Amino acid sequence: MGNKISIGLLGLGVVGSGVIKLIENHQEKLVHQLGADVQVKSVLVRNLDKQRDVDLDRTFLTTNPDDVLNDPEIDLIIEVMGGIDEAREYILKAFSAKKHVVTANKDLVALHGPELQKAARKNKCDFYYEASVAGGIPILRGITEGLSSDRIRKVMGIVNGTTNYILTKMDQEGLSYEVALKQAQELGFAEADPTSDVEGLDAARKMAILARLSFSMDVDLEDVEVKGISDISLDDLKYASQLGYTMKLIGYADFRDRQLEVNVQPTMLAKNHPLASVSDEYNAVYVYGDAVGETMFYGPGAGSLPTATAITSDVVSVIKNMLLGVTGSQYVDPHFNKELKESDKCFGQFYVRLHVKDEVGVFSRISALFNELNISFKRILQNPIIKHEKAEIIVVTHQTSLENFQTALNHLNDLDAVMETKSYYKVEGDAEK
Ligand code: NDP
Ligand code: HSE
């Protein structure tokens, strides 16, 4: 390895450019930690003629992946090109050539993480992906190293900046969903196609990775139940606020009695919940461990330099492992067999907003239905909508099983007095505290 470490970069976009800048600007600190120069030797791009906002010798650029993957002087590959199939192929080639890999590619790690991990181990290579979840926040290290001695029970995350930005702007400035989304796109948080942001898939990918490492089991992307934010109305945000809650897109993973619940859904958080004050495009991950209790990790979930810090810290870890001769074992293999909770084992409080006929006895019929299912009410609001001779009823329940709540929703639709179930959301925390 000598006193120079050569890196191959796959991709030179937002994140790749940040990596070049960070390695350049923090070279002194890197040399101090590692006793070696860290240099990017070769960079794969699609278009050699594109204008770049980094100071890089153009002869380093190539459109041929083999120039990077087959270069014997390169020990370590950073994959920041995105996409699934080519990225997967190149990373597997890198492992076969005994090169370590660092990636920011959440889509790839969520889908093929276990396969890539296995290939890394087989070839005695390191495979790190800190930047794939919550950009600049060192959450994967926090979980796998900082909390390695604890038993993690619950992980809740605001892990998508675009949706957090949209909900913040709708809630605090009354912007419409469309205008807030447009702003998020202009500011560069949203994916090229923002569907995966607003429909919760981007957050689901990150939750699959988080749950895998937190609970030491092979969690697949399909195990994560997903509901996005595109249906949320300003009315629901207004009622949430009136009741003492803030709406957030929450990734939720809970592991009890060796059973896992993992989902992404808009959730009304009590304003005193640690995650409720995370605004704009910021991310945060709340982790509850048996011994440590509540912890929270907060910071930028995307962006060129924040994401580059996560990648470059992974690079430092890989190089330290190389120096110690201990590569290939950074994340432990899954310890538990996966068993997902059925809906009768998933508990929560729920908000439901109904439009009902404005007539005598309607509320008592709704109340009787919830009573039968043993669901008690925590908060109730009722507003007449005089022009349309109907009323709006908002109910927040106490803890109940998801199964019971879903049964209640089904039976509500059968009640003659209920005209429409406008919306329903999970509720976390106690707004009255
Ligand atoms: P960009 O689109 O800005 O950059 C992608 C780069 O990869 C470009 O330089 C492009 O080349 C190159 N590239 C893409 N496909 C190919 C290909 N088939 N062959 C050769 N070169 C290719 O993406 P980002 O930098 O924003 O994201 C990179 C990765 O980091 C993604 O996996 C993303 O999910 C992840 N990530 C991004 C964050 C962010 O804040 N942007 C945050 C956390 C993770 P060219 O420049 O010539 O077009
Ligand atoms: N589109 C993503 C977000 C980028 O909004 O969080 C970072 O993964």
Image (tube, rainbow, N blue to C red):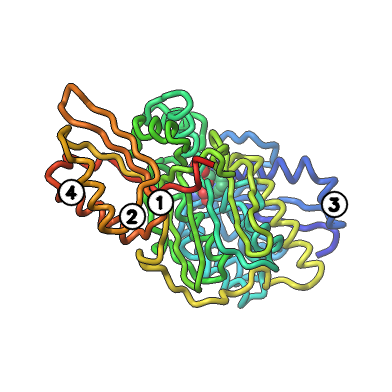
Amino acid, disc 4: Asn
**Label 3 neighbourhood size at 10 Å, few (<14), some (14-19), many (20+)?**
some
Disc 3 secondary structure class: helix
Residue pointed to by mark 4 = 413
The answer to whether mark 1 and mark 2 are in CB contact below 8 A is yes
Residue 431 lies, in percent from the top left, at 49, 41
Q: CA distance from mark 1 to mark 2?
A: 7 Å
- Residue shown at 49%/34% (left/top)? 165
Residue 316 lies, in percent from the top left, at 75, 57
Q: Quadrant of residue 356?
A: top left
Is 94 situated left or right of 173 in this image?
A: right
Q: Which mark is residue 375?
A: 2
Q: Which mark is residue 31?
A: 3
Disc 1 secondary structure class: loop
Which marked residue is nearer to the observer: mark 4 or mark 3?
A: 4
Q: Nearer the viewer, residue 9 or 31?
A: 31
Can residue 343 be seen at all in this image of the molecule? Answer: yes
- Among the two numbered marks 1 and 4 on one chain, the one whose residue lies closer to the N terminus: 1
Amino acid, disc 3: Val
- Among the two numbered marks 3 and 2 on one chain, the one whose residue lies closer to the N terminus: 3
Residue 46 lies, in percent from the top left, at 51, 46
Is 85 situated left or right of 368 in this image?
A: right
- Among the two numbered marks 1 and 2 on one chain, the one whose residue lies closer to the N terminus: 2
